[in-house]
Amino acid sequence: MSRTRTALLAAMALVAGATGTAFAVDPGSAGIAAVPCTVDYKIQNQWSTGFTAAVTVTNNSAAKSSWSLKWSYAGNQKVTSGWNAKISQSGAAVTAANETYNAQLATGGSVSFGFQGSYSGSNAIPATFTLDGVTCNVDGGPGGPTDPPDPGGPANRVNNPYEGAKVYVNPEWSANAAAEPGGSRVANQPTGVWLDRIAAINGAGGKMGLRDHLDEALRQKGSGELVVQFVIYNLPGRDCSALASNGELKADEIGRYKTDYIDPIKAILADPKYASLRIVTTVEIDSLPNLVTNTGSRPTAVPQCDVMKANGNYVKGVGYALNKLGDVPNVYNYVDAGHHGWIGWDDNFGPTATIMKEAATAEGATVNDVHGFITNTANYSALKENNFTINDTVAGKSVRESKWVDWNRYLDELSYAQAFRSQLVSAGFDSNIGMLIDTSRNGWGGTARPTGPGATTSVDTYVDGGRYDRRFNAGNWCNQSGAGLGERPKAAPAAGIDAYVWMKPPGESDGASKQIPNDEGKGFDRMCDPTYTGNPRNNNNMSGALPDAPVSGHWFSAQFRQLMQNAYPPLS
């Protein structure tokens, strides 16, 4: 058994322990035999047409390598989705069978799973359960149909999870920030937690794991509402166009992605212990747009992106993640939607929305599993360019004809996010979807920040002299020189925008500036090399990357200090 699988089974045991194991008969009592199995069935949340339930099964007979629990409802209850078990229903009869990761059920061992269902009228606890054909004792537990819904449960699901809520501060990032000179000014800001490999689920290299962060989030929550943000980032053949963020799973390992990565994450997120949290997931950054812009006969095409388009594993992986994580009532899925300097051209804009709809309806997912989208994740595109507009003309030429804009229809992230939201609704997503914008590194303040438009000598002098974004090209993405912290995280800042967020923790590297051996599957990309002269994806410009950068995700002190220095709004 692998170390990862062993740790996962241990985590599952913790889930079972958290819900409480009930014995109807004391197995140690003299003259009384232990019941073969016990089922603890609890209604966790209930509202007018639906409910969620948590079930814990304790096995007091011989150890099992697989298990199947069956029951029947007396009313019209219907199971609509489940987690930690494969649940099927025929009429009133329900069967819950093990997943691959929780098939082992030792003597005296317990396993927990949960589900969401619908009903009308009464919602009585089933009278009889059988485990592999043997009748179990039943304990309805302290919960019941009359219990009020837990805060943050499905009865309290909200349109914008960020409104009226605190957002989780990662203590590990906060400590890194506070250790830098002046870092205490931002060390209390909320940032995303990146689950960028399987080992991150249980904690790698002494770092906190998923459960650790959720437990800390409960502590920070107190009596109010709290959002905790996770980046789901481990697709097979990950980031086909950028070697610095390549991952551990090979292009064809969609099976491992499902069983060893997404399924364990869902198992933890679905623990009723965390039902009061608002859990935001950013699903697989830099994946789906690659299938549009970096494939086929385009000059920006990359062979590995053609592979991922042909095998369909980006679409399948995103669909599977949305389906499974979307089953958890208090999870809010936001799909990554690139940024304006990537998707803002006519031949990218519509097709990207189309492929996102394809992914959102793959592997059992539906558009209802998508709460919204996020733009500019781990990127540098300015939030709002104020010194010129897309409709300006200079010396007889449109701003769109400038080398910087290059016929893009959008100058900045806010205009792009709002427009792309409309495109996504047209593609079939719900009209209430919200957008997030990552503002962690797009402030572009400091002494280089222009105070007005450039000279009207030409359209290029006009745009280049006035733009806040000081990159050589909007396609540059690695540890950009001159960048600054952007708008601080805030809820509902503009129409259609659920929040500005710091999903990429400022100070965590985008990639190493030279080859650095590592055990995280991360390669070396020349776009992180300050001497690199570029490729078609950045119009063959210099990379603009900072020197001496560590492997992606590792702390980069020099970058963090620059981000503070160039913050806009400035730090006080």
Image (cartoon, grey):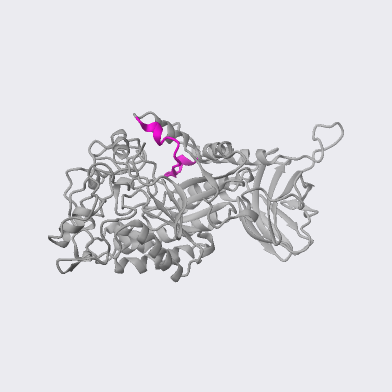
Q: Position of residue 487 (x, y in %)?
A: 38, 47
Pick the front one: 203 or 528: 528
Does the magenta portion include 187? yes
Q: Is residue 2 visible in the rendered structure shown here? A: no
Farthest residue, direction front: 452
Residue 358: image quadrant is: bottom left
- Residue at the spot 37% in from the left edge and 56% down from the top edge: 287
Q: Residue at x 70, y 45 (%)?
A: 57
The quadrant where residue 435 appears: bottom left
Quadrant for residue 559, please give it: top left
Q: Give the magenta part as a residue range.
A: 182-201
- Point out the residue furthest to the right here: 31
* Magenta highlight on residue 149: no
Q: Position of residue 423 (x, y in %)?
A: 41, 68
Q: How many discs mark residues in the rendered view?
A: 0
Q: Position of residue 386 (x, y in %)?
A: 29, 56
Identify the residue shown where x is 16% and y is 59%.
460
In this view, which residue lies farthest toward the left?
A: 457
Apparent side of residue 122 relative to residue 160 in the rendered image (left or right): right
